[in-house]
Amino acid sequence: MTGLLNHESGSVERVGDDTARYDHLAGQWWRPDGAFAMLHWLAAARGALVPLAGRPGALLIDLGCGGGLLAPHIAGFGYTHVGVDMAASALRQARAHGVVPIKGDVLHLPLGDGCADVVVAGEILEHVTDLDTAVTEACRVLRPGGLLVLDTLADTAIARLLAITVAERVPGVPRGIHDPALFVNRRRLVRLCARAGVPLSLRGIRPSVPQLVRWLPRRRGRVEIVPSASTAVLFQGRGIKEAG
């Protein structure tokens, strides 16, 4: 079953497989006032956690890269930016922004062990049906000493309230993109990463409230993602893969 797009609101009224949903919203990726506006803000925050490449030929793998929104935030950092996604329509746009596209599933990455200097998993873990495998794969392709960066939604009642009940009532925000049953248990995530050799530290993040209030009426301007005292809604993770 494919998603059905309401072309007036930009919302997905019925949900099916993720590829179909994002194909319907393909024209929204690079609109800063569009359905994926918050993904632009999160991409900037994610990019701020990525260091300059430490060696020639360094590889950054961007899991669930979508339209390549991370690309401008790491331009000039010295990485070959490889994006993995299931949606061909998104990968075409990622390629146009300098990303090397690979059509693939984050649960079965078509990449070799230890090939990446950085693995980025931005707003993807809350969409996977097998968190254990997704984490194992992300850590598998990371070389010892390599960096894992992620952001996702917590498996909490307040996250479900804000990300679905509240957010999906905001005009222009797609409905049905998230399945609350897939929101991520933080302790489990940390445990899975540790098992794969990546001690993970978490920090809460949120949109700047004053900037968000100014943005909402006209959907113009930038909204910065800032640290939050709590990881109970939206959070980032960062960890270095251990040797051996």
Image (cartoon, grey):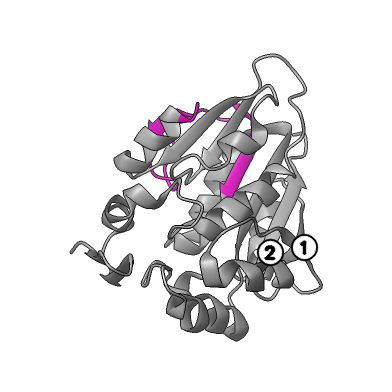
Residue 219 sits inside the magenta stretch: no
Instruction: Give the residue number, with chain letter if any, for mark 1.
Output: 203
Q: Which SS type dominates the magenta stretch? A: loop
Q: Residue at x 48, y 84 (%)?
A: 165
Instruction: Give the residue number, with chain letter if any, for mark 2.
Output: 235
**Label 2 amino acid?**
Phe
**Label 1 amino acid?**
Arg
Local crowd at mark 1 within 10 Å, few (<14), some, or many (≥20)? some
**Residue 176 in sight in this render:** yes
| Nearer the observer, 89 or 188 | 89
Most extreme residue toward the front, as rendered?
218
Magenta stretch, residue numbers = 97-121
Q: Quadrant of the C terminus?
A: top right
Most extreme residue toward the top, as rendered?
56
Local crowd at mark 2 within 10 Å, few (<14), some, or many (≥20)? many
Which circle marks residue 69 in the picture? none
Q: Quadrant of the N terminus?
A: bottom left
> Is there a contact, CB below 8 Å, between mark 2 and mark 1?
yes
Residue 137, percent across and down? 53, 44
